[in-house]
Amino acid sequence: MQVHFKIHGQGKKNLNGDGFAIWYTKDRMQPGPVFGSKDNFLGLGVFVDTYPNEEKQQEAQKRRYSPGNQAKQVRTVCAERAVSAADRAGPWLLGREEKLIRDLVPSQRVFPYISAMVNNGSLTYDHDRDGRPTELGGCTAMVRNLNHDTFLVIRYVKRRLTVMIDIDGKHEWRDCIDVPGVRLPRGYYFGTSSVTGDLSDNHDIISLKLYQLTVERTPEEEKRDREVFLPVVDNLKLPGMEAPLEPMSGLALFLIVFFSLVAVVFAIVIGVIVYNKWQEQSRKHFY
């Protein structure tokens, strides 16, 4: 799918929001909190996020837990206890608070930011963290208020999901997301949605173009793709994203039943032999 889009507005840096999404989902779009569509969806979402919710929260936490603020608090306590602030708010305090700030600030992402998420219906998009816990991959894409055309391409070939962008006006595709082992069922709906909050932007979807790629597949690959009934990503350790168990073949089922019956018959024979031995011993004791 090739998406031709444009994001523009009057807001300055980080004073705009919130972004738009491209969907491939089991259900038709319903209004909700994830870029204007419902949460706990079944399928794929590709998000062009223009507002850093998590970064703003971290900035507030940094101001709250900054060494200067903590030193002021300690000096107040020390004054009440008639203890020198210099003795109490030394290197130990500053080192401890600097570590706390580092713990509060994970690796930063620069916005606008493009990310992807596959959901089997059990996952919730974490809006406050900009989807970081369930993100498959992503990249920075400076796409606001540009004077040239901007595009993104979503490709799904042989269980490999890739997203590429052309946003520099050079007519060159740049890699953004590349995730193998993605299983998406057939027959879902394509769609797009966007959302704004206290801040706003214009999200123009100029065109959506779908292309059917010609790819050679073995009969086994074709059968395997037809048997995908739930969206999932192989080897991805996320809550609720465990891969469904592969159905057993007819031969495996026959062998399990056969050996189970053999084991039952063998146990019955052993039981009969033990019972007969016990009866013989009982007769000898009686006579």
Image (spheres, helix red, strand yellow):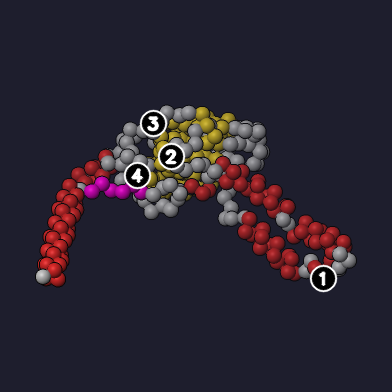
Question: What element does badge 3 sit on?
Answer: strand
Badge 2 amino acid: Gly
For residue 183, the mark is: 4
Q: Which mark is residue 121?
A: 2
Magenta region includes residue 177: no
Residues drawn in magenta: 243-248
- Which is more foreground, mark 2 or mark 3? 2
Q: Residue at x 26, y 44 (%)?
A: 224
Residues at circles 3 and 1 in contact by the CB criterion of under 8 Å: no
**Is residue 114 among the parts visible in the rendering?**
no
Q: Along the polypeptide, which appears first: circle 3 or circle 1?
A: 1
Marked residue nearer the N-terminal end (2 or 3): 2
Q: Which residue is mark 3?
A: 189
Left or right of residue 68: residue 252: left
User: Image quarter for residue 259?
Assistant: bottom left
- Crowding at mark 4 (Cα within 10 Å: few <14, some 14-19, many 20+): many
User: The residue under label 3 is which amino acid type?
Assistant: Tyr
Residue 102: image tag: none
Precedes in sequence: disc 1 or disc 4: 1
